[in-house]
Amino acid sequence: MSITVTTWSLEQTSPADLRPAAAPAGEVQIIRAEIPSPEFSRFLYTAVGGDVRWTDRLGMTYPQWEETLGRPGVETWVAYERGTPAGYAEIEAQDEGSVEIVYFGLIPAFRGRRIGGHLLSYAVARAWDLAERRPELAATKRVWLHTCSLDGPHAMDNYLRRGFRLFDTKVEDEQEKTAPGPWPGAHA
C-alpha cells in the first residue's frame, strides 16, 4: 500500500537563531555517548523510531553501525530521566561547515514531559560548537534537519520554536512500512 509523505527540511544559519527551551522539571541529564556502541545506538533508534516508522537503519550490519558511528563528527547525545534513557539526538558534521541532526526523538513513554524541547536545544547547541570538540572539522555555519508527516504531532512545532526555518518541502508516495519498534505492541 502506498502513502503520501511530506518531508520538510529546516535550518539555522547562525548560533543566534537558537531559541532554547526551558529545562524540564525533575532529574533530566543529557550526556554524550562518547564510545560508539552499535548495540546502544540501535536500541535508541528502535525505541524512539519504532512507532514513527524509522526503518532505514534496521538492515544495517554490526560493521555498518560501527562505521557510521565512528565517522569524524558523529556524536550521540542521550537524555536520561532519573537514570533511564528518555531519548537521543545524533548529529553529524558534513561538508562546508554544515551539521545535520540526523536523528532526534524521545521514547514514547517520555513524550509530553517537556524533555524534547530541552534535548533539541542542547543538541543544536552541540551542533553549533562541534568544532570546539573536533578541531579537525570546519566551524559550523549551518545546522539542519528534516522531519516528515510520519513523525510525532509536536515535532514540527518543536523545531520552529527552537528557531529553525523551513527551506525545502517534498511530497512523495512511499510504500507503507511497519516498523517493529523495540518489540511488537510497545506503547501502541
Image (tube, rainbow, N blue to C red):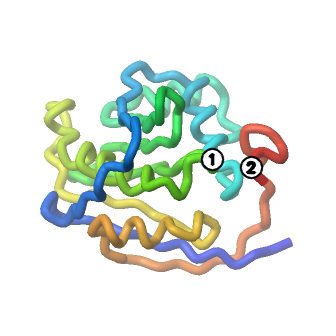
Q: Residues within 10 Å of mark 2 (few under 14, many from 20)?
A: few
Residue 46: x and y, percent?
A: 66, 41
Label tally? 2
Whether residue 77 is visible to the viewer of this picture, yes or no, is no
Q: Residues within 10 Å of mark 1 (few under 14, many from 20)?
A: few
Q: Is residue 150 left or right of residue 166?
A: right
**Residue shown at the point (19%, 31%) measured from the top left:** 133
Quick one: 140 or 80, which is closer to the camera?
80
**Residue shown at the point (58%, 30%) measured from the top left:** 64
Q: Which residue is mark 1?
A: 109
Quick one: 135 or 78, which is closer to the camera?
78
- The three-letter amino acid code for the residue at tag 2 is His
Residue 18: x and y, percent?
A: 22, 61
Callout 2: SS: loop
Quick one: 72 or 121, which is closer to the camera?
121
- The three-letter amino acid code for the residue at tag 1 is Ala
Decide: is 19 above or below 79: below
**Image quadrant for the C terminus?**
bottom right
Residue 8: x and y, percent?
A: 47, 73
Callout 1: SS: helix
Whether residue 76 is visible to the viewer of this picture, yes or no, is yes
Residue 78: x and y, percent?
A: 43, 35
Q: Contact (CB < 8 A) between labels 1 and 2?
A: yes
Q: Is residue 184 left or right of residue 58?
A: right
Q: Which residue is mark 2?
A: 187
Decide: is 32 above or below 20: above
Q: Earlier in the sequence, mark 1 or mark 2?
A: 1
Residue found at the very far front of the displayed protein: 26
**Residue shown at the point (40%, 35%) measured from the top left:** 27
